[in-house]
Amino acid sequence: MDRTALIHKGRDNVSDFVLVVDGVPLADASAITRMVLTLDSVVVDSDVESGIDWSGMTVYHGRPAALLRLKLGGVAGLNVGDELEGDLVVYDPDNPAGVVWVRGYPFRVV
C-alpha cells in the first residue's frame, strides 16, 4: 500500500492523519500549541499559515483519536511533480523546543 500523501497544487484537498503515540492514538491534542511541517526546504508553520489543523477528532481502531488535517495545496514553493519528505515537529507547554513527531513521511505534489 502506498502511504505517500498527495498535495493537490492549487486545490482545497486535505490529507488526514491520526496522531499516534507509541502505537496508541492520541485522545486529546488540546495541549498542542503549534506544529511545524518541513517538506524538504519548504516550511509550513501553524503560527503563520492555516494549512495545519489538529482540532478535529476521529475514531481509530475503536478509540477516540486526535485528527491532524493538512490542507497544503496553496503553500508557496511546492511544484507539481515534487516528491518530498516531511518532518513534523509538535510543540506544547511542556515541550517549548518541540518534539519530532515524524521524520521522512513521503509527500507528492500533483
Image (spheres, grey):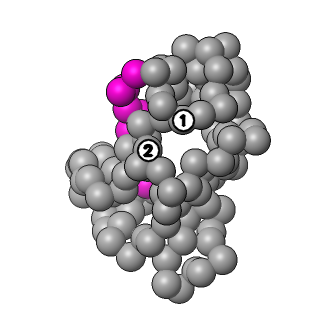
Number of residues whose C-alpha sits closer than 10 Å to that of mark 1, classed few (under 14), some (14–19) or many (20 or more): some
Q: Are marks 2 and 1 in contact (CB under 8 Å)?
A: yes
The secondary element bearing badge 1 is classed as loop
Residue interval drawn in magenta:
11-19
Viewer-side residue, 24 vs 109? 109
Q: Position of residue 36 (x, y in %)?
A: 58, 57
Mark-to-mark CA distance, 2 and 1: 8 Å
The secondary element bearing badge 2 is classed as loop
- Confirm whether residue 18 shows in the render: no
Q: Is residue 15 magenta?
A: yes
**Residue at figure coordinates x 46%, y 21% from the top left:** 10
Viewer-side residue, 66 vs 109? 109
**Residue at figure coordinates x 55%, y 14% from the top left:** 110
Residue linked to disc 2: 51
Q: Is residue 91 magenta?
A: no
Residue linked to disc 1: 75
- Confirm whether residue 110 shows in the render: yes
Q: Position of residue 58 (x, y in %)?
A: 24, 48
**Residue at figure coordinates x 43%, y 54% from the top left:** 19
Image vertical order of residue 65 relative to residue 2, above or below: below
Image vertical order of residue 65 relative to residue 81, above or below: below
Q: Position of residue 21 (x, y in %)?
A: 49, 62
